[in-house]
Amino acid sequence: MKAVTFHDVGDVRVGEVPEPVLSGPGDALVRMTLSAVCGSDLHIYHGHTPVQEGATLGHEFVGVVEQAGPEVRTVKPGDRVVAAFYAACGRCRLCRRGLWSQCESRAVFGHGDYFGGLGGSQAERCVVPNADVNLELIPDGVEDEQAVFVGDILATGYFAAERGMIRPADTVAVIGAGPVGLMALMCAQLFGPARVFAVDMVDSRLELAQELGAIPLNPREVNPEIEVQRHTGGAGADAVLECVGQIAAIETAINVCRGGGTISSVGVPSEVNGDFPYFDMWNRGLTFRSGLTNVHAYMRPLLDLIEAGRLHPERVISHRLRLDDAEEAYDLFDRRQATKIVLRP
Ligand SMILES: [Zn+2]
Ligand SMILES: [Zn+2]
């Protein structure tokens, strides 16, 4: 089958790989209908995430079940499904506490052998282990372009907003208006804030953030700390959702947060340059929450919200390409020419 594979830093290719096959009785084989290119794929592309040569990439996807092992109960061939971007076992102690992100045998799709050796979704087919745990049925009223984000960036945006402990009339600041930041700002609005700021240095992202209801702040033009204070009687934001994953973004988050506020950090810390500002966090009495999204907890509720017309995640899509054009897709995304790219096999 056709798939996108990793070869070297800055070198991904579309080529032929062996067809994936079911290995366990709980597995399902999914034929892709849509896959996305994620910021985490760029971490691989840049060599910040260790992946062996030839690994199939992609972890954000929707598709149709083609084959299901004898123990699969919740999905059957022909069903439209969305997968979590990592597979959990559903049986270990932490899975049974509802902490699928901390599963002792967590494995990430399209991240090579070091992250569990699962196949990738930027391909024609992919095997999903423990299908009952890791797949969710897509309602008829939800399009592929909406559902594709439920297993990754939309869940991450919701996770960021929920853990920001936003209350009605709060002021929220989202640091980073890339795909995850845009999802976080859409999800923050579900919690009833008075205003949401979006901080980013890319104007095209800020324009979209503004269309989605945020007040845009470009640190190249204004001081975000002063602007947020100006709108909050000098106090700062009640909740700050950090969606970048660099120390500089954490510092901005601290600067715009009010004393006693909450910083909810979901940016993947792929390149950590500098020290964590422990003293500032302590001195300002901030609550800092971070971590890998507990995706499985949010997939069903997010599909319900989309079906009800309360969330429109497809608005972040800037490019619709074919799987054959994946090399161009990575290049566009890397050069920040694209907000979000989806690939159709
Ligand atoms: Zn991702
Ligand atoms: Zn587990």
Image: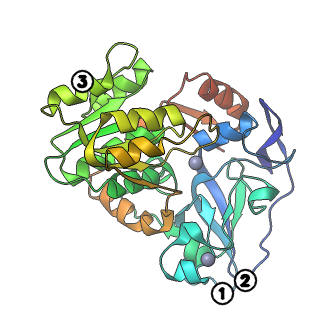
Q: Mark 3 packing: few (<14 Cα in 10 Å), some, or many (20+)? A: some
Q: Is residue 301 above or below residue 194?
A: below
From the viewer's perspective, is 165 left or right of 338?
Answer: left
Residue beneath disc 3: 227
In the rendering, at what x and y percent does residue 57 appear?
Answer: 72, 47
Number of numbered discs on residues: 3
Q: CA distance from mark 3 to mark 1?
A: 56 Å
> Quick check: can you spot residue 111?
yes
Spatial distance from mark 2 to mark 3, Cα to Cα?
A: 56 Å
Q: Residue at x 38, y 49 (%)?
A: 282
- Looking at marks 2 and 3 on the same chain, the residue that comes earlier in the sequence is marked by 2
Q: Tell me the number on the disc at residue 189.
A: none
Q: Please say if 137 is above or below 63.
A: below
Specify the amino acid type for callout 2.
Answer: Pro
Quarter of the rendering containing residue 238: top left
Q: Mark 1 or mark 3, which is nearer the start of the sequence?
A: 1
Q: Residue at x 47, y 34 (%)?
A: 249
Q: Which residue is mark 1?
A: 71
The residue under label 2 is 25
Single out the residue that lies furthest toward the bottom: 71
**Please, is residue 201 above or below residue 31 in the view?**
above
Measure how far apart labels 1 and 2 are at the Cα level. 5 Å
